[in-house]
Amino acid sequence: MAAMQDFIYASLPQRVRFGRGTLAGLGDELERIGSRRALLLTTPEQAGLAAAVRDAAGGRIAGHFAGAAMHTPVAVSAAALAELRRLDADALVSAGGGSTTGLGKALALRSGLPQVAVPTTYAGSEMTPILGETAEGRKTTQRDPRLLPGTVIYDVDLTLSLPPGLSAVSGMNAMAHAVEALYAADTNPVIDLMAEESVRALAAGLPAVIADPQDGAARWQALHGAWLAGICLGNVGMALHHKLCHVLGGSFDLPHAETHCVVLPYALACNAPAVPQAMQRLGRALDAADAAQALWQLGSRLGAPRGLAALGLPESALERAADIAAENPYRNPRPLDRPLLLALLRQAHAGDPPRPM
Ligand code: NAD
């Protein structure tokens, strides 16, 4: 029986189109929001998406800004905003991973224009009203209902080109949202169901994606899991794992998805004694007695990087990382202190299977 715990459930207003070949519905979606002159956003690496997007949009794309970059630098947003004004655009179409979605959100905030997000990774940003921006090396994060894309088109076919290495770490990044949702202080029964199903879908889908990146059924399952994980991230508060990754990315410049992938089993091993119900759900979803071990094994099976050392973090940085992580207290099911954070970081640095903390 579920634990008796009061909760608040509020769903976010969004329209999601999910499937294979769904990009073809972009014209209809733009029509629905009354857009005739949308600005397309991509990274330089994904500029090649423009032809397919223009085709699908049926003449409703007014221009293309191919400068989206990791961590949403405000200088990039300013340049894109100038292009948006020059074109007199009436909507934003962001086609790409979390970096591109982030640029769409930054522009929506500055212009008030509606967004259509077309995600091509498993990051989940398209389902959240959250934006992290960087200016002069400092990252600030904000939550605002205006940031949430009103329309999201998940096209499984657009994920077929995501290289196996990126698929692995991006998928584990999604997994982290679902894992932390299961012990969020503000969770609710709907999010619990979504989070458990997300973990199950990602754990089944990702190994099959790595075995054959062109396997449409596996890609479907992984993207389905990532969508659910994104809902979790958008609806409830994250804890230890996300905060640590924020520190490691923000202060030590470690890569986003890779860092999530490395840290997750250790963050879960640390919180495990304080979250028996979440561990039970995770054990069920992962079909394992010890969910933290199972996540470590899954990462290994996917060929993902093991250990912060492998991501280039020197051992000498661990003390400072523990200082920063301990500086600003945040909500976490297990009370945290500097020695515990340092023990966790040392394990994550070495990359061996997680041990009880
Ligand atoms: P990304 O968007 O930076 O993409 C990584 C690289 O992969 C880019 O070069 C991109 O062009 C390429 N790529 C993406 N999809 C591809 C595909 N299908 N085929 C081939 N290449 C492809 O990486 P990401 O992990 O998706 O996003 C990370 C960023 O998103 C970080 O800045 C992170 O902070 C942010 N994020 C924000 C939220 C939020 O809720 N605000 C949530 C998750 C991530």
Image (tube, rainbow, N blue to C red):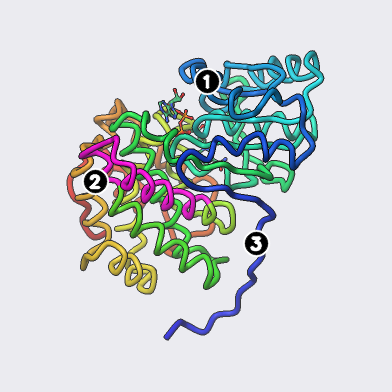
> Position of 57 compared to 217: left or right?
right
Q: Which label sits on residue 72?
A: none
Sequence order check, earlier mark of 2 and 3: 3
Taking the spot 21% from the left edge, 37% from the top edge, the residue there is 303
Q: Are discs 2 and 3 less than 8 Å apart at CB? A: no
Mark 2, ligand 1, within 8 Å: the answer is: no
Residue 79, position as x, y percentages in the image = 69, 14
Looking at the image, is 28 positioned above or below residue 227? above
Kind of element beneath mark 2: helix
At label 3, the amino acid type is Ser
Sequence order check, earlier mark of 1 and 3: 3
- Packing grade of label 2 (10 A; few <14, some 14-19, many >=20) is many
The residue closer to the viewer here, 28 or 191, is 28
Taking the spot 44% from the left edge, 36% from the top edge, the residue there is 121
Q: Quadrant of the C terminus?
A: bottom left
- Packing grade of label 3 (10 A; few <14, some 14-19, many >=20) is few
Residues shaded magenta:
206-230
Looking at the image, is 40 positioned above or below residue 2? above
In three-dimensional space, the C-alpha distance between marks 1 and 3, rounded to whole angstroms, equals 30 Å
> Position of 151 compared to 32: left or right?
left
> Position of 169 compared to 122: left or right?
left
Q: Which label sits on residue 43?
A: 1
**Magenta stretch mostly in which secondary structure?**
helix
Taking the spot 35% from the left edge, 45% from the top edge, the residue there is 172
Kind of element beneath mark 1: loop
Residue 305, position as x, y percentages in the image = 25, 35
At label 2, the amino acid type is Pro
Kind of element beneath mark 3: loop
Taking the spot 47% from the left edge, 68% from the top edge, the residue there is 192
Q: Which label sits on residue 11?
A: 3
Q: Which residue is the site of mark 2? A: 207
